[in-house]
Amino acid sequence: MMRYALMVLVALMMNGCATKLADDQHEKLMDYGMVNSKKIEIKNSETSKTFVIITYLNPINHELVDQESEKFIVGTYMATGNGAYEKAELSGFQVNGSDENLSVTSLKQDAPVLKLVSTVNAWTNYVLVQAPKTEDINMEVSFENDQSQRVSVKFQKDY
């Protein structure tokens, strides 16, 4: 009887450790997503602001992120000040000053790649921006907002 109890106790301890390891991997993934994200706040008027969050995916070690291109998830929404959120449209994306061979793909809220972003919500539009792979250490993503203002954000690769 004592052997049986000891074996059950060992099995429970091993199961508990495996669960903790899985949680640590998810936390580590979220940490990488937060570290490689930039938040931009664009003031449109006294009561309206556009919020943009850009996450550089390439430093994240995950099966959804191949290293064949530079990948960014861009999330945006407009807070109007009256408690409503409107969809904000961004255009004219460039990576390192070029839009050559750049692709911008709209993402649905249930897109698997959004699990790599630390915060996902229903009122934000998400797009995946992909640019040709570059060996440059410094990366710059720029775009135009609804007000035709060019906005840029810089990232630095980890080597």
Image (spheres, rainbow, N blue to C red):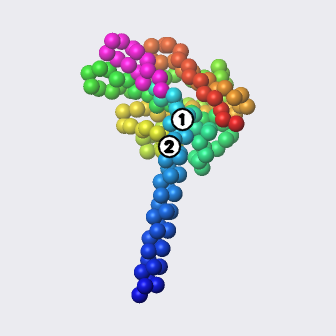
Q: In the rendered structure, which amino acid carries the disc numbered 1? A: Val
Image x and y of residue 83, in percent: 27, 25
Q: 85 and 30: which one is in front?
A: 30
Q: How many marks?
A: 2
Q: Which residue is mark 1?
A: 35
Q: Residue at 26%, 21% (x, y): give it.
A: 82
Residue 112 visible in image: no
Disc 2 packing (10 Å; few <14; some 14–19; many ≥20): some
Q: Does the magenta segment cover residue 134? A: no
Q: Which SS type dominates the magenta stretch?
A: strand
Image x and y of residue 146, in percent: 44, 17
Q: Does the magenta segment cover residue 41? A: yes
Magenta part of the chain: 39-51
| Number of the label disc, if any, that sits on residue 30 | 2
* Relative vertical location of residue 24 with respect to residue 133 in this rendering, above or below: below
* Relative vertical location of residue 138 with respect to residue 7 in this rendering, above or below: above
Q: Quadrant of the C terminus?
A: top right
Label 1, label 2: how far apart the Cα atoms are: 9 Å
Image x and y of residue 14, in percent: 49, 68
Q: In the rendered structure, which amino acid carries the disc numbered 2? A: Met
